[in-house]
Image (spheres, rainbow, N blue to C red):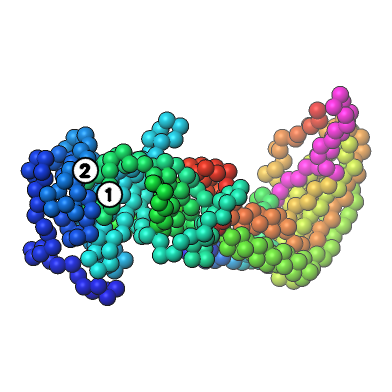
């Protein structure tokens, strides 16, 4: 019984991978914005990214 | 009636019962197995009597409080086991001692006038249905002794001296309290092969692990059976799970997954749609840093977009606020990426962390015309940083395959761990605690 369930589960996993690849899914985080004004091409500074206040890591030992 | 045996007479008739009296205390004695009984025990005064003697000669009397040990299946209980009617006619407690600890188990003697005797043993809620062997097993000695019975190999589990500590009912042999026998068990779950040696005589029996619910159902016993404790020597591994089959399924699914990965890598267009190089001079007076790229076209079906950033950073960082913007619909994907690389040398030797490259995948981007808005940032103390931005359409995401492999592996790991734990628990009680069962 477990073996059959595992096979079904396995094929669901494979199906999910195939679907994610076909649909072009990603695991990266990003913010989707709608109706960005066309004027950005002329004035890029008018657009403010939500990521602009990111705290930068200054690494090293 | 199945198995071709007529049913036992109904309780009201009971023609087989022979009423006798104990010569010691006068209590009535019931013989249920006709002439088969060799000894019978008086439940009142615990005298073991010679059932073959018309006067019921006293053979032994042992000390036990009345009702000291009550069988879970009372004497005289009738039930149908494996299609045959049986009556419980005898009960005994036996024990072995190991490292100063006494381990008790109980044996029930069952009788059917047409089929003969059969036994049930019970140890901490684990039951075995036992019959005398039809053929003599062949024992193989060696590092791990084994026994071959009817072509099946049973592995040696334990050898111990068993002592009879309590008896009631009747028995087809000369039973005595204090009687000792060397008991050797061989296992092949769910079966158990047992050899008892005493007074130069060997008796082989074969048992099959029986779930307590089956016993309760067979004898129509009230309530619920006691829960089994621990893992018994011939207890089958948890039902419906075969570790070998699960591993075989995992292997097959992994091959499918690798095939899928190769296929997707082959069919993915990975089309370069935009590449450009830029420079950032953090030291210059700060004006508007953001800019937009030329428009590029994304073709084909809705798919992902890979944006790869490479920068010549050294003990520094560059941060880029990205927005992939559709010129056609005004839809944008906004994200930030950092490229940083640090290295040096200390008492532990050379070290480095970070990377001069970064890759991000933008999900499910419809076809159309797009451009990037880029807003770079860097530490003002650092010199000129050169970086390139490369965009590709429809790339394989190998992370998915890694996570899928993990998702496939975790159930296998769980089942394997459970199986190993089960077998360890089984063999920890044996003379060979490091052995693993071959049953799975």
Query: Which chain is home to disc 1?
Result: B
Q: Is disc 2 surrounded by few (<14), some (14 to 19) or many (20+) residues within 10 Å? A: some
Q: Which residue is mark 2?
A: B59
Q: Residue at x 88, y 50 (%)?
A: B388
Q: CA distance from mark 1 to mark 2?
A: 9 Å
Labels 1, 2: one chain: yes
Circle number at residue B186: none
Q: Residue at x 16, y 46 (%)?
A: B57
In the image, B318: left or right of B331? Answer: right
In the image shown, does B231 or B11 lie closer to the viewer?
Answer: B11
How far across and down, in percent of the image, does residue B166 sit?
26, 41
The answer, for residue B295, to whether it is visible in the render is no
Check whether the beta carbons of the residues at disc 1 and disc 2 lie within 8 A of each other: yes
How far across and down, in percent of the image, does residue B44 sit?
13, 41
In the image, B360: left or right of B116? Answer: right
Q: Which residue is mark 1?
A: B174
User: Which image quarter holds the C terminus of chain B?
Assistant: bottom right
Principal secondary structure, stretch drawn in magenta: strand
How far across and down, in percent of the image, does residue B288 sit?
81, 42
Residue B40 versus residue B101 in the image, above or below: below
Span highlighted in magenta in the image: B330-356
Q: Residue at x 82, y 65 (%)?
A: B271
Query: Which chain is home to disc 2?
Result: B
* Quarter where residue B164 is shown: top left
Residue B144 versus residue B112 in the image, above or below: above
User: Which image quarter holds the N terminus of chain B?
Assistant: bottom left
Number of numbered discs present? 2
Helix, strand or loop at label 2? It is strand
Magenta-drawn stretch contains B83: no
In the image, B389: left or right of B333? Answer: right
Helix, strand or loop at label 1? It is loop
């Amino acid at each position: 019984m477990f073996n059959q369930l595992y096979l079904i589960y396995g094929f669901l996993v494979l199906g999910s991978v195939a679907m994610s690849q076909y649909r072009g899914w990603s695991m990266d985080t990003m913010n989707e914005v709608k109706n960005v004004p066309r004027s950005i091409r002329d004035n890029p500074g008018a657009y403010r990214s939500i990521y602009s206040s990111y705290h930068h890591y200054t690494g090293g030992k | 009636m199945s198995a071709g045996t007529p049913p036992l007479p109904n309780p009201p008739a009971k023609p087989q019962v022979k009423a006798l009296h104990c010569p010691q205390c006068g209590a009535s004695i019931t013989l249920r197995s006709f002439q088969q009984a060799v000894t019978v025990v008086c439940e009142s005064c615990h005298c073991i009597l010679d059932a073959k003697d018309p006067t019921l000669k006293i053979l032994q009397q042992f000390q036990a409080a009345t009702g000291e040990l009550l069988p879970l299946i009372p004497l005289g209980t009738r039930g149908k086991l494996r299609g045959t009617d049986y009556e419980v006619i005898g009960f005994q407690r036996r024990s072995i001692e190991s490292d100063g600890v006494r381990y008790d188990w109980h044996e029930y003697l069952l009788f059917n006038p047409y089929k003969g005797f059969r036994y049930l043993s019970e140890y901490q809620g684990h039951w075995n249905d036992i019959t005398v062997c039809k053929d003599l097993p062949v024992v193989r000695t060696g590092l791990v002794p084994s026994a071959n019975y009817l072509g099946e190999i049973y592995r040696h589990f334990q050898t111990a001296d068993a002592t009879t500590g309590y008896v009631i009912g009747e028995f087809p042999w000369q039973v005595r309290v204090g009687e000792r026998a060397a008991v050797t068990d061989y296992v092949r779950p769910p079966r158990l092969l047992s050899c008892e040696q005493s007074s130069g005589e060997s008796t082989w029996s074969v048992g099959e692990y029986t779930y307590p619910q089956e016993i309760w159902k067979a004898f129509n016993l009230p309530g619920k059976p006691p829960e089994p404790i621990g893992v018994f020597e011939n207890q089958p591994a948890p039902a419906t799970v075969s570790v070998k089959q699960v591993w075989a399924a995992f292997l097959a699914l992994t091959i499918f997954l690798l095939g899928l990965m190769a296929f997707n890598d082959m069919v993915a267009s990975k089309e370069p749609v935009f590449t450009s190089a830029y420079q950032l001079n953090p030291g210059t007076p700060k004006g508007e840093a953001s800019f937009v790229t030329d428009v590029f076209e994304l073709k084909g079906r809705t798919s992902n977009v890979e944006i790869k950033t490479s920068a010549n950073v050294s003990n520094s960082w560059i941060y880029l606020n990205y927005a992939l913007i559709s010129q056609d619909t005004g839809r944008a994907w906004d994200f930030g990426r950092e490229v940083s690389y640090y290295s040096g040398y200390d008492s532990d030797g050379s070290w480095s962390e970070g990377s001069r490259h970064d890759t991000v995948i933008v999900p499910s981007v419809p076809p159309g015309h797009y451009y990037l808005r880029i807003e770079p940032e860097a530490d003002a103390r650092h010199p000129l940083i050169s970086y390139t931005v490369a965009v590709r359409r429809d790339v394989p995401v190998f992370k998915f395959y890694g996570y899928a492999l993990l998702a496939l592996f975790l159930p296998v790991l769980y089942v394997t761990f459970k199986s190993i734990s089960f077998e360890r628990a089984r063999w920890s009680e044996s003379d060979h605690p490091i052995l693993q069962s071959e049953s799975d």
